Image (spheres, coloured by chain):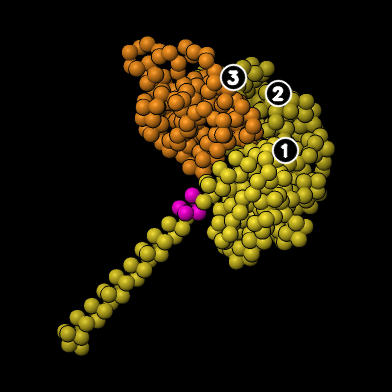
Amino acid sequence: MNISGIIYIYIIVSLLIAAAYSIATILALHARRKKQHSKQLSNSYLQQIIAMQGREGEVNARSTSERMALAQALHSIMSYTYSTPTENTKTIARNNRLEELILNKLRHANNEEKARLLNILSSIPISAHATDIISKYLHSANRHIRIAAIIATIAASPTKAIRTIADLPFSLKPYDTSRIIALLRRGLLPIAYEPLLMSDNHNLLMLGIAITHNFGIDIADKHLHNIILRQPNRQIVREAIYTLATLGRPLGRHHIREQLAAMSPNIRRELCHHLSCEGYSLSALSVIFSESEIIHAEPLINSYKRSLICTQSN
Amino acid sequence: MKSVIIYSTQNAIGVLVEAMISGSDANFETFQAGSTRELLSMARVLRPRLIILLDIVPLLDGCDIVARLHEIESNGRGRLSRSRATIYVITWQQSEHTVLSLLESGIDQYLTFPICIERLRHKVSQQMTSNTLRQ
């Protein structure tokens, strides 16, 4: 090949690279502009919906991007507030066919987008048909999709929440229960903690312990002691001990010390640190842990970080 | 006109809270700050009646935002101005330790999400119409 041929190839390849780079830049700019526009739309809908509180009114969206921004705005409002009148939400969702839009997008979305869309569905009133479609995602291999599907299913049918949680094909982790607690805080779920703490079902127990922990239910301590005494599952026992610590209860009882002795050194150290921050005194810790374990707790206990808290255990 | 500054690193939440506290009968203006520097420079210029923080990082990262806000209000002369801004914090944090740390750092009110729109609106409205001088 002669030199001019090489030069021609070089020029063509350079032009192709420049063209590809330009196209990529234009597409990226277009995507960014679309995202900003969607954010601005969503903010505008936020303001309109909140201004409508307690009054009748309409919020209309025409195009797909507008309806998606409206769904996002509704989701933000429902996530961050409680006691928001639901009549307006139902009307807006129905008039703008938001359920249909999100179910269509769900079919073709990637995993991350599926989880996001399912989260949005948890804030919109949906039909029984949609609930059936969402229930497929409870068996997804992706954990985030599974959790988002649980939240959407429970939000759609709060009276069946206990059954849904009990029948889940996997065990709930603390992060999962915290998502369910967020629904409780919005006033969506009529759940009593006591039956959950007496249940044999792993998921219901985890939820009951999480409710006790989050809402500081002091009078549940006898149930927590029963769990520590009888439960074979280490994870549940550990959660129960942490919850007792949050409630500021003494942890020196024989069955608790027995369970702690069976735990790994890492978990024991972690618990020791946690108890120091929760306000337990050195003498309370020395009943549960060995001298070598509490040697690092003393400086923490004496520091300003826990000087704000006075608990019964002191 | 009286002003309220809302500090939030997430614009959507700031807009949401702004929409919650504004109403047709609101007798104040709201402004958004996205960073600590912006918050301080707005506070210097606007001398707001109320500051709402939607993020606790400026309170716990060592920059001591409350003391710096008070310093602005004292005009750096060691004298407090007639009325200093009330500081509300609204976040998802529930743990007792964190809440007590925040109150210890000098904020006036701590609220958690999820929040009732009517209640927040009423609280802010009362705060803005209050004639009580803060020392």
Chain A, colour shown: yellow
The magenta span reads: A36-40
Among numbered discs 1 and 3, the one appearing first in the sequence: 1
Q: Amino acid at mark 2?
A: Arg
Identify the residue position indicated by label 2 in the image.
Answer: A249
Q: Position of residue A26 (x, y in %)?
A: 37, 64
- The residue under label 1 is A187
**Residue closer to the observer: A189 or A240:** A189
Q: Which residue is mark 3?
A: A309
Chain holding disc 1: A
Say if mark 2 contacts mark 3, CB within 8 Å: no
- Amino acid identity at mark 1: Gly
Chain in orange in the render: B
Q: Are marks 1 and 3 on the same chain?
A: yes
Question: Mark 3: which amino acid?
Answer: Ile
Closer to us: mark 2 or mark 3? 3
Q: Nearer the viewer, residue B11 or A147?
A: B11
